[in-house]
Image: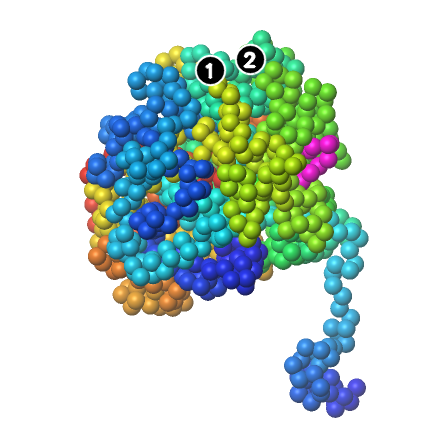
Amino acid sequence: MGLGDWIGRWPVLRQVAGPDRLGRGAASRSRHSDQLAPRTTAADRVVKSVCPYCAVGCGQDVYVSGNRVTGIEGDDDSPISRGRLCPKGAASEQLVNSPTRLTRVRYRRPYGTEWEDLDLDTALDMIADRVIDTRRRTWQDTDARGRVLNRTMGIAHLGGATLDNEENYLMKKLYTALGAIQVENQARI
Amino acid sequence: MAECHPVGFQWVMEAKQRGAVVIHVDPRFTRTSALADLHVPLRAGTDIAFLGGLINYVLQHGLDFRDYLLAYTNAPAIVSDEFGDTEDLAGLFSGFDPATASYHPRTWSYDGARAAAPIGHPEMGADDHDERAAEERLGATGEPLTDKPRMDPTLTDPRCVYQIVKRHFARYTPEMVEQVCGVPADTFRRVAEAVTSNSGPERTTAWVYSVGWTQHTVGVQYIRAASILQLLLGNIGRPGGGILALRGHASIQGSTDIPTLFNILPGYIPMRRAHRRQSLDEFVAADAGRTGFWGNMKAYAVSLLKAWWGEAAQPDNDFCFDYLPRIDGDHGTYRTVLDQIAGTVKGYFVVGENPAIGSANGTLQRLGLANLEWLVVRDLQMIETATFWRDAPEIETGQLRTEAIGTEVFVLPAAAHTEKPGTFTNTQRLLQWRHQAVEPTGDQRSDLWFYYHLGRRIRDKLAGSTDPRDRPVLDLTWDYPTEGGHDEPSAEAVLREINGVGPDGAALSSYTQLADDGSTACGCWIYCGCFADEVNQPARRRPRHEQSWVAPEWGWAWPDNRRILYNRASADPQGRPWSARKAYLRWDPDLRRWTGPDRPDIEATKPPDFQPEPGAQAQHALSGTDAFIMQTDGRGWLYVPTGLMDGPLPTHYEPPDSPVANPLYAQQANPTRQVYPHPDNRTHEVGSQVFPYVFTTYRLTEHHTAGGMSRFLPYLAELQPAFFCEVSPELAAERGLEHLGWATIVTARAAVEARVLVTPRMRPLRAGGRTVHQVGVPYHWGGNGLSVGDSGNDLLAATLDPNVHIQESKAATCDIIAGRRPRGADLRRLVGNYRVRAGLTGPAGMERPDGTDQARGT
């Protein structure tokens, strides 16, 4: 490649010298950009979803290759969002593919100074034991005036508002059966 | 709206293109203001005065929509002559008890008629509740009450609601609005003229709000004020009208409908209260109105009990009604945090939430976390609520020490929204199903998985127990089909249980099918129909190009797929549209049914001239013009005769931290606000010279609440890389603050440092006879992630609305000084010195800044 040829490929020169003065067409192209293809074209499938940030409920098309999300775009079919996403919704591919996402259980023992590893099954078992034990220790049958309480005030819950309806339903059902009443959500905040 | 619900704002822009006038009332100038026809900055915490000014403007100029008002609201209803207004009682309503800082609301009732609050009085203690319920049944005189109040259609009786409202707001003049809100009277008049000229048969005006209206000690009354205005103008139940709550999160509406909230069961059925003995029938009688759709509460409640306890729930055991635990007061999240500090709460589940950053008064939150026996955090990222024991700000100051914190912490990785199927309910009550795109990796699991398997394991461990306390757990219906290698429970099976089934086991299609005899089971009555015809209705995605503008085949809205609530009011009493321009529903006399682009929010075949039989119950007691079908009297309430803790009408009270004395009343702040006495939870003196500035907290487009879903993302962290505060050039000059430099913001609660954005977007206001500077504080930050900073919510005190226990986080006072904050123990000394200067050194909870107020320590 001669020097003149190399300079001639320079987009700004082609924009100034060529017909595409606004740099919106041929002048902005290069061999590199000609080889680019949207990540979405290589996807195995497109899955219909909903943005997890605010309460507008924008439709999302989730592009998947293998078991990996390769891109998330607005769903043009949606009468709510008409294909648009805001900065957060448009960044949600980074939300699901974040390299800092937790993948393993972390455990800090009482008075500990470091994280420790813990098997998920063991963690679930330990949590179940603590619920049962705390419930027994803090159970209230009645109050001082003899009114029925049938509850524990030893166990509390605070949930975020990105939980699914089905998840909230199982939570409320289980906590209520356990007698845990201090069950709260971002909806109160 | 353009900042926090940007994609929804496209519809506002589309309306503007078609001629709509857009007005933005907000202390700060945002992208919404930039695109509005008029931005009206006001002093944070004064919206009731502003809305009250609009109500007064409508009433003084006779601009109400009279036909709508007479037919669909309680404007003509006659109120008890024992009622005393704030105008007569220096800012208090009749029935105030200073000893308990609460109201006995008996005198607020209709004259001789019973009204029931749509969901009872879930916030009251059992004794107060029973007393009030008995009053509602019998009335003050002991005579049985009628269900419908006496009416004066001329609206001239001095005791009718219309006249009471008119007197209540008479002093909310444009000049008073200017004095309270700092909005020039002429600007206010422009707003009033725009709103009133754009309302009536031919036009409608919509109000849109978010937590700028709810996060106050008078938040419920903010919404009430908007309700009064919109009912006066006939803007409810009609296309282009309404009061639209823009809720902040993907399924915050769903979290309220199927509540993880202490005071309600699914579908807004109240939780049980402590009693010596109470049957299901007594519970229903105490909480439900006899008339209106809540008259069917027993069917909703029995169907819920059947969904939860299945075969164990039988008529002879009151359908396991006694399995329900009881509440006896406030058990909200702030009460729980104080109880954590006191040591009575041992274990805490925090699921997809980050209270160390996202809740008011972060110090209290972290002191609570540090005093637990065990903590379970489930999240996508390592958030501050999980790491408090090693890096909380209180560790740095020495208030907490890692080695002394006994909390056992389990951090469990959660699955993302693409890694599990399920529904969100968006801000318009629309359920939308997400299909699963990929499998989660490692230990990541859905919360559905976690709770299903936790419940399964607890039930296994309790199996064989003879302890009656364990029966509710062991009798629970908990057999969900599982799928895949992780035994993921079927979300669709759970949704179907929520929808409910009939005697034949088939999915129900409407809540009107629910029965009180145990023959139906339904997990949430308002969601009944979301699985009609055995079809996952929220998964419907008929493209918008292929259906009407109402788009009824996109997802599914509760109740009954209705897209505009109370849409009976879109037609006149005879069932004809109020105007061709605003046509929505109409009664078709040939078909003998309601027709239109939406499902009617009334029985589809109930004619406009329907009159109920004497003694009829539930919806059958409502006439064909009773548009507000959840109310006992079928009418929209300008005046609330029962159900609120702080009065039947909105009244301007100053926030707990305020720069000025209340210009309207001797009563400074909401007399029934909830305060939690704690040395780190003090409020400031009115007009404090130590804390002379107002600050307000808010969110940015590029971050999400407490940051767990945004501060860890490179794109978003790059867009908003640091905690900052917004100040006006005038305040910057007064305090020597430099643009892009550092400032330290101080309250009696905490001191935080932020980058300074000096901008004319913040405007000093003239209010209460003085200049009020306001500081803008976005609250997303914490120490973890890619974009880090101090937490703005640390500056707030937790002081709550008495109705719903939501905190005041939009209006408080502070000092601001140039430079970074001190480090280590010096930081605590700085805050301590401010407390000394402000005189806040006595026992916590004893400050009564307004003389008549009582600290309501609960």
Label 1: chain letter:
B
Image location (x, y in percent) of residue B296: 54, 23
Residue B497 in which image quadrant: top right
Tag of residue B318: 2
Q: Is B537 in the magenta? A: yes
Question: Element under label 2?
Answer: helix
> Crowdedness of circle 1 by 10 Å Cα count: few (<14), some, many (20+)?
few
Q: Is B99 in the magenta? A: no
Q: Residue at x 39, y 64 (%)?
A: B761
Q: Residue at x 72, y 51 (%)?
A: B546
Residue B716 in which image quadrant: bottom right
* First in residue order: circle 1 vs circle 2: 1
For mark 1, what is the residue?
B282
| Left or right: A42 in relation to A127 | right
Image location (x, y in percent) of residue A178: 54, 22
> Crowdedness of circle 2 by 10 Å Cα count: few (<14), some, many (20+)?
some
Residue B259 vs B694, above or below: the answer is above
Amino acid type, mark 1:
Glu
What residue range appears in magenta?
B530-538
Q: Which residue is drawn at 38% across and 20% down?
A: B145
Quadrant for the C terminus of chain B in the image: top left
In whole angstroms, how far apart are the C-alphas of marks 1 and 2?
11 Å
Foreground pick, B120 / B457: B120
Foreground pick, A73 / B379: A73
Label 2: chain letter:
B
Residue B601 vs B708, above or below: the answer is above
Model colouring: rainbow
Tag of residue B46: none
